[in-house]
């Protein structure tokens, strides 16, 4: 296929394809003459870097919030000191992580206006609403009640204090819902009308926007992933504690609970992932085709586990494929027909006019597999550990416990690849079928400005990552606080900055 | 009243909330090394902000999000236009937030003094730049209509650094420092309280001079609307009340009046602006107002319902937080001020 190959080899082309090749080549030359990186590419990189980075911390926050609330509830109910130690210890890890999540989230709120002003003008009538609601309904709740939780140990009754962490955790869920609803509009615009007079998309139904199945399925796919991430983090930390013989009284139940959370979450992620895939096939068939690098429409399409060789639609050198699975994932029927990239490209050209409607296939293909792979690996590890622990046992093998340290990183990678897939395989659209990414960038912001801010953000985020990781490791090494719980009036504050 | 005007008012309220709350945060951050001389004092000062700073900052996020929802053209032109100042503010807010959370984790002097410097600088920059930004909005900026019909900012970074805007920046900076000093005088015991009170007296007078010049300049060259004249007068009266209260050691009143003054300054600026949201500096040039910058009536209506239901709730539970943490903090309440929780590894 001459069109797909990067080198644009002309050898195997039919005459019609040859014409296209020449046309595309001409276009590429025009592009080549430009500066290597323009403001658009840089703004895309900046969005990718800041968002992927932000989303390392978000799922940990959402999942850990609930797990810490669970630990504190266990302490509240049983009054056992080990649960209090666990609450405080994992609470510290939760907060170190939360700090970075909060501050990097500020950038997200303003980045649309800074780098994507044309996008903001086009969708502001619709997209701004869930963002503002997220702030009013969720951010206030999270920040205020977390403040109460952190500093309220000796200022609130035990019951009220327990309530603060639950409310903060619920705040994170609300936040996730609104931002996913906003994102769902970009995947599948609903509840709007295009106004040709103003050249803007206008909101017609807030209910349609907030309740469409794209948003609901994304929410129920993302939240279990967050629990999976937090479960893996807690279990991984508990594994290290057992390896070092630290506070096994805490580590044991946390490891078991963490692993159970991982396994159950993985099942839910699988079910909702399947649901999302079907919605995606219906709403963005190109994305599903890109996920499999499926060029030609096929019935009973196979799903390949991996491919050696190019993904440009020419022959794969080596591939392991499971028959009919792609058809099942996309349509729910093993014999279902899955549309291929070439047919979709033609159909889109007819519908939207000339242009390249194919996303970056290798990124789509591999990120989709890495998402499933890393998530699955975490679940497998958790299942094995639970098997170990089934009769009240505990993993003793040093190598096994050491490898458990890697466990928290698996779902983090899976989360990142999942979003890289979702967002990159929607390209060239920023709002699918409605508005292209290339049209969204701020016209007045120079490439130099975007480059400068991108480098600064990246450096700062890099430094913060090192500091954050250092603090997490150190907090784990310091371990749970074994000093006896103070009772009665104390002159000193329990919590001070 | 049209929904457009309602949203103009609501955006003003969000900025009022933000500047009152994060205003004293900034002031406290800037004064950290001046009012607090040892570790116990530094930590006492930071603990006054501990449970509050994040909730205060959310006012900014909501102001941003609400501007996006209600006035997308304003949001787009403002933030792509004031690109570098906003970027500096964002960087500062990132560093500041992390600094609060991480600074006392270790006892090491180097670790702490680095974060302390970060807090001072990262509080100073936004306190100054917000004033610069708002003064520019009121003054008007170069704007032009692009080929697509959007009204885009047509100036550069240095257009924003004009004398009027810089005076606006110094005014907010000085106002927030004083507001922060009043907050510390109200929330601490001992030396910090005494020092904060003294700083409040000095900085209060500096602020008075700056604010009068800034408002005078605004009235002399930008607008002579009766509402702005009245607003400016009330600002001055309220500020004098704050200074008098501080002078008499009535800390609660001083803080209340500096909060009211902050609100009045924002109100006066929004009155000067109305019905524009981003006027063109060249008279007759294209500019943004509450009508051509706004969302559709439907979106404004939906958002009005959400705001009217949620804002009072937010005020109630945020108010409750301030009530829970109403007690003054004394440096001697900080257990082991020199050490951090991560200093020693148990075993």
Image (cartoon, grey):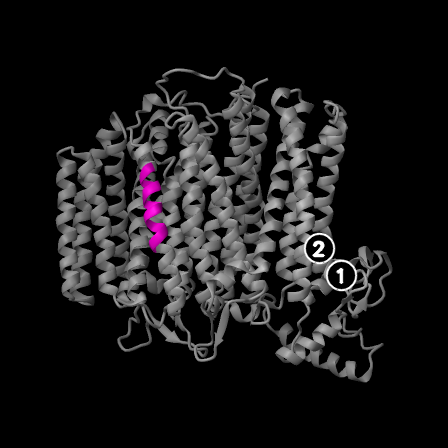
User: Residue at coordinates 18% horizontally, 39% vertically from top-left?
Assistant: B254
Q: Which mark is residue A292?
A: 1
Which chain is mark 1 on?
A: A
| Image disc number at residue B117 | none
* Chain identifier of the residue bearing label 2 in the image: A
- Residue B323 position, x and y percent, is 30, 34
- Report crowding for label 1: few under 14, some 14 to 19, many 20 or more residues within 10 A (C-alpha): many
Q: Quadrant of the N terminus of chain B?
A: bottom left
Q: Nearer the viewer, residue A153 or A76?
A: A76
Element under disc 2? helix
Q: Secondary structure at mark 1?
A: helix
- The span picked out in magenta is B308-320
The Cα atoms of the two marked residues, 1 and 2, are separated by 9 Å
What is the magenta segment's predominant secondary structure? helix
Q: Position of residue B16 (x, y in %)?
A: 28, 52
Residue A156 in view of the camera? yes
Q: Earlier in the sequence, mark 1 or mark 2?
A: 1
Relative to B62, A72 lies left or right: right
Label 2, on which residue?
A368
Tally of numbered discs: 2
Quadrant where the image shows the C terminus of chain B = top right
Above or below, A457 against B140 in this view is: above
Identify which residue is drawn at 56% across, 72% down.
A434
Identified at 22% across, 63% down, the residue is: B272
Q: Quadrant of residue A352?
A: bottom right
Instruction: Pick the residue in front: B319 or B125.
Output: B319
**CB of mark 1 within 8 Å of CB of mark 2?**
yes
Left or right of B156 on screen, residue B201? left
Q: Residues within 10 Å of mark 2 (few under 14, many from 20)?
A: many
User: What residue is at 16 percent from the left and 34 percent from the top?
Assistant: B250
């Amino acid at each position: 296929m001459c069109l797909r190959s990067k080198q644009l080899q002309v050898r195997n082309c039919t005459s019609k394809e040859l014409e296209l090749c020449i046309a595309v080549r001409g276009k590429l030359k025009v592009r080549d003459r430009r500066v290597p990186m323009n403001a658009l590419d840089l703004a895309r990189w900046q969005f990718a870097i800041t968002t992927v980075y932000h989303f390392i911390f978000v799922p940990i926050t959402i999942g850990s919030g609930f797990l810490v609330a669970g630990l504190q509830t266990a302490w509240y109910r049983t009054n056992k000191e080990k649960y209090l130690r666990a609450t405080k210890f994992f609470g510290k890890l939760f907060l170190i992580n939360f700090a970075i999540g909060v501050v990097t989230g500020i950038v997200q709120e303003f980045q649309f206006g800074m780098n994507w002003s044309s996008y903001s003008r086009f969708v502001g009538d619709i997209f701004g609403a869930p963002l503002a609601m997220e702030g009013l309904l969720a951010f206030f709740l999270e920040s205020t009640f977390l403040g109460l939780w952190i500093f309220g140990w000796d200022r609130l009754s035990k019951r009220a204090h327990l309530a603060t962490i639950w409310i903060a955790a619920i705040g994170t869920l609300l936040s996730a819902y609104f931002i996913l609803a906003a994102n769902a509009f970009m995947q599948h615009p609903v509840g709007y009308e295009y106004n040709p007079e103003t050249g803007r998309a206008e909101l017609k139904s807030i209910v349609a926007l907030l309740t469409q199945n794209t948003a609901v399925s994304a929410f129920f796919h993302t939240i279990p992933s967050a629990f999976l991430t937090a479960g893996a983090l807690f279990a991984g930390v508990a594994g290290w504690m057992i390896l070092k013989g630290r506070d096994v009284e805490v580590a044991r139940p946390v490891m078991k609970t963490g692993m159970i959370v991982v396994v159950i979450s993985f099942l839910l992620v699988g079910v909702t992932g399947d649901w999302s895939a079907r919605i995606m096939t219906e709403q963005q068939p190109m994305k599903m085709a890109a996920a499999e690098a499926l060029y030609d429409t096929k019935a009973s399409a196979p799903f390949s586990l991996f491919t050696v060789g190019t993904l440009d639609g020419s022959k794969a050198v080596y591939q392991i494929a499971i028959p009919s699975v792609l058809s099942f994932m996309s349509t729910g029927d093993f014999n279902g027909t899955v549309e291929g990239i070439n047919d979709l490209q033609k159909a889109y050209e007819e519908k939207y006019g000339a242009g390249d409607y194919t996303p970056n296939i290798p990124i789509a293909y591999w990120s989709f597999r890495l998402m499933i792979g890393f998530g699955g690996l975490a679940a497998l590890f958790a299942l094995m550990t639970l098997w170990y622990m089934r009769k009240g046992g505990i993993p003793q093998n040093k190598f096994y416990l050491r490898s458990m340290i890697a466990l928290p990183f698996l779902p983090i990678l899976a989360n990142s690849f999942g979003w890289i897939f979702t967002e990159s395989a929607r390209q060239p659209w920023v709002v699918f079928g409605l508005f292209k990414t290339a049209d969204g960038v701020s016209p007045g912001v120079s490439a130099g400005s975007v480059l400068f801010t991108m480098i600064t953000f990246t450096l700062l985020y890099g430094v913060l990552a090192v500091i954050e990781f250092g603090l997490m490791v150190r907090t784990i090494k310091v371990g749970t606080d074994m000093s006896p719980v103070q009772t009665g009036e104390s002159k000193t504050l329990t919590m001070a900055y | 009243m049209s929904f457009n005007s309602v949203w103009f008012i609501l955006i003003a309220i969000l900025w009022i909330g933000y500047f009152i709350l994060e205003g004293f945060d900034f002031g406290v951050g800037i004064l950290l090394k001046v009012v607090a001389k040892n570790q116990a004092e530094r930590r006492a000062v930071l603990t006054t902000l501990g449970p509050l700073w994040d909730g205060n900052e959310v006012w900014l996020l909501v102001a941003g999000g609400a501007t996006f929802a209600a006035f997308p053209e304003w949001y787009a032109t403002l933030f792509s236009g004031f690109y570098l100042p906003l970027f500096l503010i964002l960087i500062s807010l990132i560093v500041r937030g992390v600094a609060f959370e991480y600074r006392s984790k270790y006892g090491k002097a180097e670790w702490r003094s680095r974060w302390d410097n970060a807090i001072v600088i990262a509080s100073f920059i936004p306190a100054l730049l917000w004033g610069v930004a708002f003064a520019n909005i009121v003054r008007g900026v170069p704007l032009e209509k692009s080929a697509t019909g959007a009204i885009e900012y047509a100036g550069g970074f240095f257009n924003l650094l004009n004398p009027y805007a810089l005076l606006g920046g110094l005014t907010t900076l000085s106002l927030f420092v004083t507001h922060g000093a009043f907050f510390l005088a109200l929330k601490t015991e001992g030396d910090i309280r005494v020092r904060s009170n003294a700083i409040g007296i000095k900085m209060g007078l500096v602020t008075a001079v700056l604010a009068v010049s800034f408002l005078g300049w605004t009235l002399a060259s930008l607008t002579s609307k009766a509402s702005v004249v009245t607003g400016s007068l009330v600002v001055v009266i309220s500020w004098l009340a704050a200074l008098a209260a501080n002078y008499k050691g009535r800390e609660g009143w001083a803080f209340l009046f500096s909060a009211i003054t902050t609100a009045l300054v924002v109100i006066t600026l929004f009155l000067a602006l109305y019905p524009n949201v981003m006027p063109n500096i060249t008279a007759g040039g294209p500019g943004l107002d509450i009508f051509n910058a706004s969302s559709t009536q439907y979106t404004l209506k939906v958002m009005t319902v959400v705001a009217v239901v949620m804002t009072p709730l937010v005020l109630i539970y945020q108010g409750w937080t301030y009530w829970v943490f109403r007690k003054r903090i004394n440096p001697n309440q900080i257990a082991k001020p020199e050490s951090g929780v991560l200093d020693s590894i148990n075993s």
